[in-house]
Image (spheres, rainbow, N blue to C red):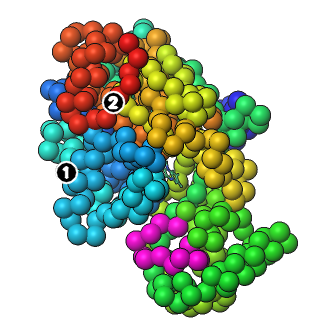
Amino acid sequence: MRTKSAPLLVKTIHIPARTIPVAHEADLVVVGGGPSGIATAVSAARHGAKVVLLERWPSVGGAATNALVNIWHTSDREKIVILGIVQELIERLQRRSGAIHRLHKYPSKPETYEFAPHEMRVAMHELLDDVGVTTICHLAAIEPLVEGNRITGVLADTKTGRKAFLGRFVVDGTGDGDVAAAAGLPYEFGRKSDGRVQGMTMMYNVSGVDAHEVSRNEAEAERVVQLMKDLRDRGEFPQFFEFAAKSYLTFGRDPGVSYNMCPVAGNPLDELELTRCSVQARKQVLQYVDLWRREMPGFQNAKVTQMGFWLGIREGRRVKGRETLTAEDVVKARKRPDAVGHGFFAVDIHDPKGGGHSTWVEYDRTPPVGQSYHIPLGMCLNDQIPNLAVAGRCASSTHEGHGSVRVQTHCITMGQGLGTAIALALKAGTAIAKVNLTKLQTTLRNDGAYLKDVPA
Ligand SMILES: Cc1cc2nc3c(=O)[nH]c(=O)nc-3n(C[C@H](O)[C@H](O)[C@H](O)COP(=O)(O)OP(=O)(O)OC[C@H]3O[C@@H](n4cnc5c(N)ncnc54)[C@H](O)[C@@H]3O)c2cc1C
């Protein structure tokens, strides 16, 4: 299940042993400040752990901020089933005018929020500061420090050289499972048939659209999408996500909306390929908007105001855990004794070959209306290095199960469960897998998380 990537480098160099300064010693080192890493760090700190969070970009938020993925879903189409840290962040943003708005309200549609990524960035940093997490951006964790079956920390590259960050527990929230893989934990990559991971997408914002004009021209929107398809089929226009393109052209959007319709395919673990994909995607965005300016009434003055600083990556390594979440768990709304929260999102797989479609629209890939599955703690844990856990999109799932649990509200729920479990493990002096589940689940509920129907 591995994709073909750049040839392995056969030439090597030898680096003599060096003395590395220890920059921080903490109870928990979280690598990666995406939605899952933030939630893990916040919940562990809230329960008394000394936490350091390491993030390679200038701000936390992961795809939510740096790739402009600004949509959150919280209901099972009948009731809200995601609360906890997700709800706290929603409320923080609601206190600021224009920072977040409800796009769809349950029960008629899934409860959906759209937020301003730069405001979310600030809210996430404030939340981390408020609970006492030491957040350090602008450094990349490059190497786990493993002794036998324990991890003692990570090495990170900084502007002033390589430094060590030591911790009693380490969580890999890198999205791609970089730390776990380097520590030797087994992982899967891509779908079974050809080893390809989900397609990537460059998100972008457009200003200058005359929404009134657009809303009067549905037939024109259909004509423009058909033109895009014809040109694409003749090889004269790039791929695009047809379903989404029609929606953006039909309804017209305000400048805060991130357009999610620019697909590219490649291996996100190969930096050369990823660079090419990012450049290709940025060119595609300009091609779409150039054509719309010429062809679509209301788009004459449209301008691209922003593209993701980071190409949106949906899937990388999936680190094998004590439990693995499958598509069947999702669609059958399976419940688990070690539940830390609920998930309900469809098995949503964007074409791994970069074509413009996704399985999101297939309703048989969604739990039944009013039902949800449990996110198990075991998908974050492993038996080889018990004090190293993973959170978020690199947690243990099949390619199909990942299609659901990868969304941000689910990753935050998972992170909140894992961080709380680590704090309890620290207090009890035990392994994460050995924490008292009743105590964990009660603590999560007391902290505002939604957690129901846990089997005995
Ligand atoms: C185009 C697109 C559209 C999507 N649509 C939706 C949607 O509508 N709703 C939704 O909820 N979700 C959506 N998702 C999914 C969701 O955004 C991601 O799956 C989610 O952000 C995963 O969270 P994470 O914390 O696991 O990883 P990420 O968000 O990927 O964050 C990982 C973080 O780790 C950091 N990092 C990586 N390596 C290192 C290192 N070595 N050292 C330090 N830091 C490191 C990264 O910089 C990043 O900040 C979408 C994703 C994409 C790409």
- Magenta stretch, overall SS: loop
Q: Is residue 274 left or right of residue 158?
A: right
Element under disc 2? loop
Q: Position of residue 244 (x, y in %)?
A: 60, 65
Relative to 427, residue 74 above or below: below
Residue named by callout 1:
126
Magenta-span inclusion, residue 251: yes
On-image quarter of the N terminus: top right
Image point (45%, 52%), residue name: 110
Whichever of labels 2 and 1 marks the residue nearer the N terminus, that label is 1
Q: Position of residue 80 (x, y in %)?
A: 36, 45
Amino acid bearing label 1: Glu
Residue named by callout 2:
451
Image point (59%, 77%), residue name: 249
Dot 1, how many residues are within 10 Å of its Cα: few (below 14), some (14-19), or many (20+)?
few
On-image quarter of the C terminus: top left
Magenta-span inclusion, residue 253: yes
Q: Nearer the viewer, residue 382 or 7?
A: 382
